[in-house]
Amino acid sequence: MTPGLDRVVDYWFRFHLVKGAISALMLGVLIALGIIVWKAFVRADALGAGKRAALVSAGVVVSLGAVFSLAALMANVQGLVAPLSSLMPMLMSGGKADPALTSTLGQVRGQLAASPGAGGHSPALDLLIDDFARYHAAMAVTAATVLAVFIALSVALWRRFARTDRSGRRARRVLASFGALTVLLSLALIVVTVANTYTAGHSAPALQAFFNGSW
């Protein structure tokens, strides 16, 4: 990479580092807040229907915020591992491209079309292909790690649901809701893991699809 591009990539690494730290802090705060809100809902026998509904609404908002923060954290970990590939969508993000950029993108598309598999590319394009593979491998590993956590959490929630007395309807409702949510998120993470694993193993054609506007 040229010194100028090297500086941009270094800046983008630090950008993802700060965003990742903020996302991690948000996730921790929202998880703690969610536990407090849902415990208050379970113990809300003396509260009126309006206050219980407010607790449910607050709990849903906090839970969705935690899911969003987790997704942001995962995306920023991916950007930390491969900041160059994280920058590449900016090449395709609208605006009138200058002639030099148009020429460069044309060379990239031409080399990828001539040799869609590994090999036969310039060193610069090989760097992009390798970084693109690293970018998707990072998400595959991150998603698989989070998937393992969600599977363990889902098992724990459903076991606790089964052990909770039927008289504790609100507690069972909360446990069943979060148990179902973890199952749904686990299914989504399976798709993310498989898709990114496949893309990492076929990075050259995937990069070609990206530069052709299919990603």
Image (cartoon, rainbow, N blue to C red):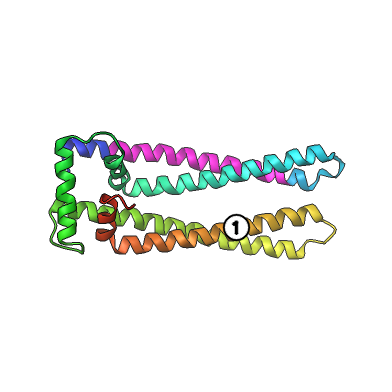
**Residue drawn at 17 percent across, 41 percent down:** 102
Which quadrant holds residue 156?
A: bottom right
Asked whether, in this view, residue 6 is left or right of residue 157, the answer is left
Q: Give, as a single range, the part of the protein colored magenta.
A: 10-38
Quick one: quadrant of the N terminus? Answer: top left
Residue at the spot x=52%, y=43% of the render?
Answer: 69
Q: Where is residue 130? Give x, y as percent.
A: 24, 56
The residue type indicated by label 1 comes to: Thr
Query: Which residue is labeled 1 in the image?
Result: 182
Report if residue 33 lies within the magenta region.
yes
Q: Residue at x 31, y 55 (%)?
A: 134
Residue 87 occupies quadrant: top left
Look at the numbered disc 1 and give the secondary structure of its residue. helix
Position of 194 relative to 92 (above/below) = below
| Image coordinates for residue 68, horizontal then vertical, percent | 53, 44
Q: Nearer the viewer, residue 21 or 144?
A: 144
Q: Residues within 10 Å of mark 1 (few under 14, many from 20)?
A: many
Total labels: the figure holds 1
> Is residue 180 rendered to the left or right of residue 95?
right
Vertical comparison of 41 with 15: above or below? below
Left or right: 188 with respect to 211?
A: right
Q: Position of residue 145 (x, y in %)?
A: 47, 59
Q: Residue at x 30, y 64 (%)?
A: 201
